[in-house]
Amino acid sequence: MAVEQPQIQAAAQRGEQTRIHNIGYRNYDGPRLGRAYARRSLYSQSLRGAYGLGRSVKSKVLPMLLFVVMCVPALIMVAVAVATKAKDLPVDYTRYAVIMQAVIGLYVASQGPQSVSRDLRFKTVPLYFSRPIETVDYVRAKYAALASALFVLTAAPLIVLYVGALLAKLDFADQTKGFGQGLVSVALLSLLFAGIGLVISAVTPRRGFGIAAVIAALTISYGAVSTVQAIAYEQSSTGAVPWLGLFSPITLVDGVQTAFLGATSAFPGGEGPSSGQGVVYLIVVLALIAGCYGLLMRRYRKVGL
């Protein structure tokens, strides 16, 4: 006790010298906008980021370049149709995205990892979930933002084609019907590609790995399936051609629009799936979209812990 007494007295003296200074910080007493506002803000920020808006000039180059590349062929087709007074457009609205699938795949590969990889790499996801955003809000905002960005990318050239067709004085009813079918097709494509791109990108915080994996899943799979379909067609195994289309995202969309939207199939020989097979295609597409959403929810529940 004799030894401890001087230590207690010294601690008491130090405590007497302690001062608390008011340096002017105030508590926030403004409106609390809640989860809905936070979710909308995250969606808006992610959508802008998908085209490099609000970021550096370097970040704008690739998405804007891919957007231009998507629209230039449509402008050329419109110019040719107007100049030659053609009676129809060179390419159907539903066929355009299939032709440009490589550009779409590159866009998803570049912007999918950009949307989620940085949050994983810098471990900022738990900060989002601190409050008021929850896991479901984060996943929905990111999914909706990338799907919206893809819809803008794929719908813009269809608008160019439609406006050009009207300027060329093509049949209004036919062009409007085709334009509507094209919008439905690219909306489905946007949901599917966005889900696949985000699931793959959320696996790794390394953006380079995510880009390579997304390209492999979207572009390389299409090349592989198309090659096998061509071989099956040359071997007179035409019955296998529609079923092989189930193994690539772009051929899945092609099969759905062929079966239900009156599109011309890009499969070898132009033989797309029948209506019965189209039901299987649609079920697989919807299951993939739901599965991607579920995998994202599971992934971010673990990350947010």
Image (tube, rainbow, N blue to C red):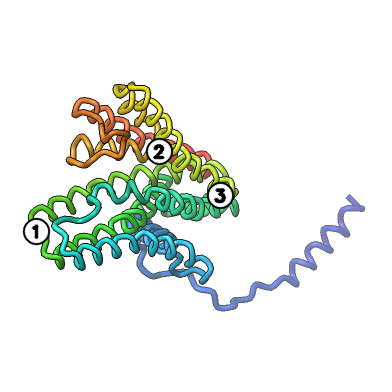
The residue lying at 32 percent from left, 58 percent from top is 152
- Secondary element at tag 1: helix
Q: Nearer the viewer, residue 292 or 305?
A: 292
Q: Are marks 3 and 2 in contact (CB under 8 Å)?
A: no
Q: Looking at the image, can residue 81 be seen?
A: yes
**Amino acid on which disc 3 is placed:** Leu
Q: Which residue matches tag 1?
A: 172
The residue lying at 41 percent from left, 70 percent from top is 29
**Relative to 304, is 82 above or below?**
below
Q: Is residue 178 left or right of residue 79?
A: left
Q: How far from the left and from the top, in percent, is residue 66?
A: 42, 60
Give how far apart the Cα atoms at labels 1 and 3 are: 49 Å
Q: Nearer the viewer, residue 187 or 236?
A: 236
Q: Is residue 208 left or right of residue 277?
A: right
Q: Which residue matches tag 2?
A: 292
Label 1 neighbourhood size at 10 Å, few (<14), some (14-19), many (20+)?
few
Q: Which residue matches tag 3?
A: 120
Q: Is residue 255 left or right of residue 171?
A: right
Give how far apart the Cα atoms at labels 2 and 1 are: 38 Å
Q: Nearer the viewer, mark 1 or mark 3?
A: 1
